[in-house]
């Protein structure tokens, strides 16, 4: 099974909404399909704020990655947050997520990005192990914080 990444386009929206709904169900995130569609569509239409990558064949993706772009003085320029990563349960445990997480920074670096960040539940040892295997390191001194507007 290949973890090839394809930049998602508007024609992939229905497939992505389905994958996103499955991820949100697993994570206990309550959101309507309409809200998911409204959040994903601009990224597929070329919004400069982020991008969505399909994992596997574009006609039948086995997962997806969402990155949102920002700017960091500390890291010297353009950076990104890995907002969502999902692999279908039936194909997990085959190294697809690791392969995707290794390919993604390479693709983003070609676009001038200086760093990629993510948030992970410290108690989710499998996810922490996956991210470390892909080269991410915890910043023990810092804590990711949010405020809804």
Image: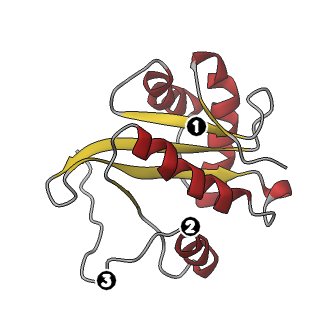
Q: Which residue is mark 3?
A: 140
Q: Name the one closer to the observer, 48 or 4.
A: 4
What's the residue at 69%, 47% (across, down)?
22
Quarter of the picture containing the C terminus is: top left
Residue 93: image location, x then y, percent: 79, 67
Q: Residue furthest left?
A: 73
Nearest-to-viewer mark from 2 and 3: 2
Compared to residue 61, the image places residue 147 above or below, namely below
Q: CA distance from mark 2 to mark 3?
A: 18 Å
How does the figure colour the protein chain or chains? Answer: secondary structure
What's the residue at 48%, 73% (across, down)?
121
Left or right of residue 14, residue 44 in this image:
left
What's the residue at 58%, 57% (across, down)?
102
Residue 35 makes an appearance in the image? yes
Query: Mark 2 vs mark 3: which is more N-terminal?
Result: 2
Q: Which residue is mark 2?
A: 134
Residue 12: image location, x then y, percent: 65, 23
Query: Mark 2 vs mark 1: which is more N-terminal?
Result: 1
Neighbour class for label 3 at 10 Å: few (<14), some, many (≥20)? few
Q: CA distance from mark 2 to mark 1?
A: 17 Å
């Amino acid at each position: 099974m290949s973890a090839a990444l394809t930049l998602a386009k508007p024609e992939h929206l229905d497939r992505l909404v389905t994958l996103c709904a499955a991820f949100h169900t697993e994570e206990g995130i309550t959101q309507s399909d309409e809200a998911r569609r409204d959040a994903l569509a601009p990224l597929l239409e070329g919004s400069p704020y982020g991008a969505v990558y399909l994992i596997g064949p574009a006609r039948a993706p086995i997962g997806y990655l969402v990155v949102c772009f920002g700017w960091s003085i500390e890291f010297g320029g353009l950076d990104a947050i890995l907002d969502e990563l999902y692999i279908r349960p039936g194909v997990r445990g085959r190294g697809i997520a690791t392969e995707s997480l290794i390919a993604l920074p390479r693709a983003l670096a070609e676009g001038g990005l200086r760093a990629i960040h993510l948030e992970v539940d410290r108690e989710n040892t499998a996810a922490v192990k996956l991210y470390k295997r892909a080269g991410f390191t915890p910043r023990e001194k810092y804590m990711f914080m949010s405020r809804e507007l």
